[in-house]
Amino acid sequence: MAGMLMRRPRAALPRTGFVKRWFLLPALAPLLWGQPSHAMDFRPTPDAEGFITATGIIGPGDALRLLQTLHGWPDNRPVALMLDSEGGDNVVEADNLAIIVKSHVTAVLVGPGATCTATCVLVLAAARERSSYTSSRIGVRSVGFGRSGATEDGHATMHMVREMARAGVPPSIIGRMVTTPPNTTAWLTAAELRSMGVHILADPVKDPGSALPTAAPLLRQDQEADVVARPPQLTAKVTAEPKRPLR
């Protein structure tokens, strides 16, 4: 049409290129938009020497964020991770956190009135020293997937079984995890917690005379010599995501 500029049509984007561009978005999302909504928050605790609090559901990139928090930690100084997390169903990232706990963290503690369920228990089980308070709640369940999370992921659950067995968790607790649907929680008793090596501490809320411990006493005397300088990078390889059954 006269007097109007004709726009040259753009060439159609090849389908393979389109798929590749959209495939990269999940990996670039943390860089473009910051920390994802379903992820843990790691912060040094100002009123407890040697503690880093870890709160929120376990999500993509949590292992890297924990390593970034540990980057400036003084060499040979014990560090304890204080958990308050419902865990979630991201077994891969829980595995990565467990790797860091084994090599970089002195002890793991479930804080006063805090919760540790689902994949969070895998992080707790990875610690050399495990502690909780009388008001802490620790529970197990099978792994779910999908929007509702109500459908069990059999492969991911069996992966949890293997890792918890390697960590020395008793078969009775592993059995409760397997038989508990992903949309419910089986809460562990004090006796069950002790059977998996969890030291139960006096609750500072109920006992005003007690206070948050420092990280060093949570580590047994015979293990203090094993605390080594923590490198600022993840040296162990990242585990592969468990395959889900075809439906």
Image (cartoon, rainbow, N blue to C red):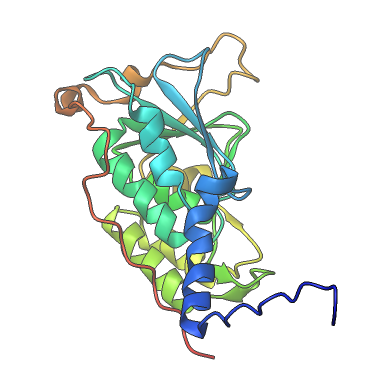
List x then y, in percent, for residue 95.
37, 55
* Residue at 44%, 17% in the rendered image: 213
* Residue at 58%, 36% in the rendered image: 136
Does residue 105 sit above or below 2 in this rendering? above
* Residue at 66%, 80% in the rendered image: 9
- Asked if one can make out residue 117 in the rendered structure from this viewpoint, the answer is no
Q: Nearer the viewer, residue 161 or 196?
A: 161
Q: Nearer the viewer, residue 99 or 35?
A: 35
Does residue 197 sit above or below 172 in this rendering? above
List x then y, in percent, for residue 158.
39, 72
Would you say 170 lies left or right of 173 here? left
Point out the residue furthest to the top here: 209
Q: Nearer the viewer, residue 244 or 185?
A: 244
Residue 128 quadrant: top left
Point out the residue furthest to the front here: 2
List x then y, in percent, for residue 123.
41, 47
Would you say 59 lies left or right of 131 here? right
Q: How many marks?
A: 0
Residue 1 quadrant: bottom right
Q: Quadrant of the C terminus?
A: bottom right
Q: Nearer the viewer, residue 25 or 230?
A: 25
Would you say 217 lies left or right of 157 here? left
Would you say 239 lies left or right of 15 here? left
- Asked if one can make out residue 174 in the rendered structure from this viewpoint, the answer is yes
Residue 157 quadrant: bottom left
List x then y, in percent, for residue 54.
51, 35
